[in-house]
């Protein structure tokens, strides 16, 4: 029974993301398909979700694909798995991903990836608490295809096209004539990567504009919801201590490019929110009327990675979301990797924080990943 309540809570959380007008006078940026903001790989997960400007790795096909032409291995296949909100007692909510990249030559590469987010089985009840309504299994996925190329010996660029499918609930319900259906949309990413030296030692910088695409709708009415367009900037520094040991530091900052949720008591505010075009919403997210204050809109990640002979890695990181209305989310992470011949195995762990009602619901999150090079 308790687990069912947790599942319903997760579903309601997703529903709130789709109903920005319910957040009257609360200064937040809510979007559809928030799973697109979850870092799916264990390397990034071990460094507080840091990734944009760190040294290239296969999992960059989920983020800054501009780094893929610098990969030493010509092609690779990878899988990742994250049990989600397991610390709340959920056993069938998870994020899984798989990807493949191939270097076409010394200056270009292609990649393809799939992310799948399952919210488990949701049991619906009527007003009397009877479970006579059919249960449903909400899920979402995205499929990407990308191309990356070196523009100069120090600068590279990646472009990604994405299809997003989101099925939260389908059909109609008692006393509710609305017919719900799965939502679909297209989006894309643009990424850049700059390295100071040919051997990747020294400073790196990364830029990622992600989820630039259309709105998404779950009904036949005219309301369409924004997807999480995001701008990320990162810097990294790699210090090769000797021929066998190196250590790398980095910082990422991310900001959503969607307007704040409207005041549902103000019809003009609601109409203004939904009538904005996608492109105008990106720019409006930075102004005083529709945007978030800079101090509350920035999400930051910082971390480090120790590398021993490209076979053994140790990682640690810290993540901070300074939005006071969403609980000032912050936590530490640790991770490790081991590479044997043509296979690499990653794991990360989110250190518990808070206690009681303030406990981080992501506490004890473990990400697993494997990479197979060819």
Image: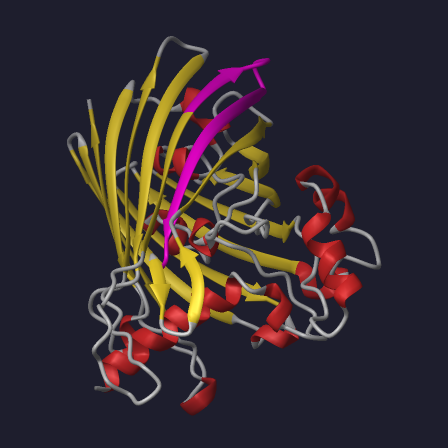
In the picture as drawn, the residue positioned furthest to the left comes out as: 341
Residue 229 image point, x, y percent = 59, 45
58 and 13: which one is in front?
13
Residue 239 image point, x, y percent = 50, 40
Q: Is residue 338 magenta?
A: no
Residue 215 placement, left or right of 134: right
Residue 156 placement, left or right of 128: right
Q: Residue at x 30, y 82 (%)?
A: 5
Q: How is the image coloured?
A: secondary structure
Q: Residue at x 47, y 86 (%)?
A: 358
Q: How many marks?
A: 0
In the picture as drawn, the residue positioned furthest to the right comes out as: 288
**363 is higher (above) or lower (below) than 150:** below
Residue 329 placement, left or right of 171: right
Residue 191 image point, x, y percent = 56, 30
User: Which residues fall within the magenta stretch?
Assistant: 146-169
Q: Quadrant of the C terminus?
A: top left
Give the quadrant of residue 28: bottom right
Residue 113 image point, x, y percent = 33, 33
Give the quadrant of residue 290: bottom right
Q: Quadrant of the N terminus?
A: bottom left
Q: Is residue 351 visible?
A: no
196 and 333: which one is in front?
333
Q: Is residue 226 visible?
A: yes
133 and 110: which one is in front?
133
Q: Residue at x 59, y 49 (%)?
A: 222
Q: Is residue 150 magenta?
A: yes
Main secondary-structure element of the magenta-colored stretch = strand
Residue 346 placement, left or right of 246: left
């Amino acid at each position: 029974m308790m687990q069912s309540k947790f599942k319903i809570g997760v579903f309601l959380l997703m529903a709130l993301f789709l109903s920005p007008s319910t957040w009257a006078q609360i200064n937040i940026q809510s979007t559809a398909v928030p799973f697109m903001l979850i870092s799916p790989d264990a390397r990034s997960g071990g460094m507080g979700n840091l990734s944009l400007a760190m040294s290239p790795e296969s999992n960059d096909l989920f983020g800054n694909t501009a780094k893929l032409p610098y990969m030493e291995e010509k092609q690779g296949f990878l899988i990742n798995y994250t049990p989600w909100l397991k610390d709340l007692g959920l056993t069938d909510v998870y994020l899984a991903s798989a990807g493949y990249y191939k270097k076409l030559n010394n200056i270009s590469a292609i990649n393809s990836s799939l992310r799948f987010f399952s919210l488990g089985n949701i049991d619906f009840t009527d007003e009397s608490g009877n479970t006579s309504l059919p249960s449903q299994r909400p899920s979402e996925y995205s499929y990407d295809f990308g191309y990356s190329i070196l523009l100069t010996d120090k600068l590279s660029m990646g472009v990604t096209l994405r299809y997003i499918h989101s099925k939260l609930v389908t059909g109609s319900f008692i006393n509710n004539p609305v017919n719900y259906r799965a939502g679909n949309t297209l989006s894309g990413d643009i990424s850049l990567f700059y390295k100071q030296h040919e051997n990747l030692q020294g400073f790196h910088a990364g830029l990622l504009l992600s989820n630039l695409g259309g709105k998404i709708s779950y009904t036949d009415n005219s309301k369409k919801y924004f997807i999480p367009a995001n701008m990320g900037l990162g810097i990294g520094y790699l210090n090769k201590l000797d021929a066998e040991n190196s250590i790398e530091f980095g910082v990422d900052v991310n900001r959503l490019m969607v307007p704040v949720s409207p005041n549902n008591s103000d019809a003009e505010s609601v109409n203004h929110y939904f009538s904005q075009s996608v492109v105008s919403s990106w720019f409006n997210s930075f102004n005083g009327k529709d945007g978030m204050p800079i101090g509350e809109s920035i999400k930051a990640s910082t971390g480090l990675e120790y590398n021993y002979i490209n076979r053994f890695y140790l990682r640690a990181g810290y993540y901070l979301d300074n939005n006071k209305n969403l609980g000032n989310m912050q936590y530490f992470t640790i991770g490790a990797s081991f590479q044997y011949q043509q296979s690499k195995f990653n794991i990360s762990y989110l250190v518990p924080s808070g206690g009681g009602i303030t406990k981080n619901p992501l506490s004890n999150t473990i990400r697993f990943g494997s990479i197979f090079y060819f």
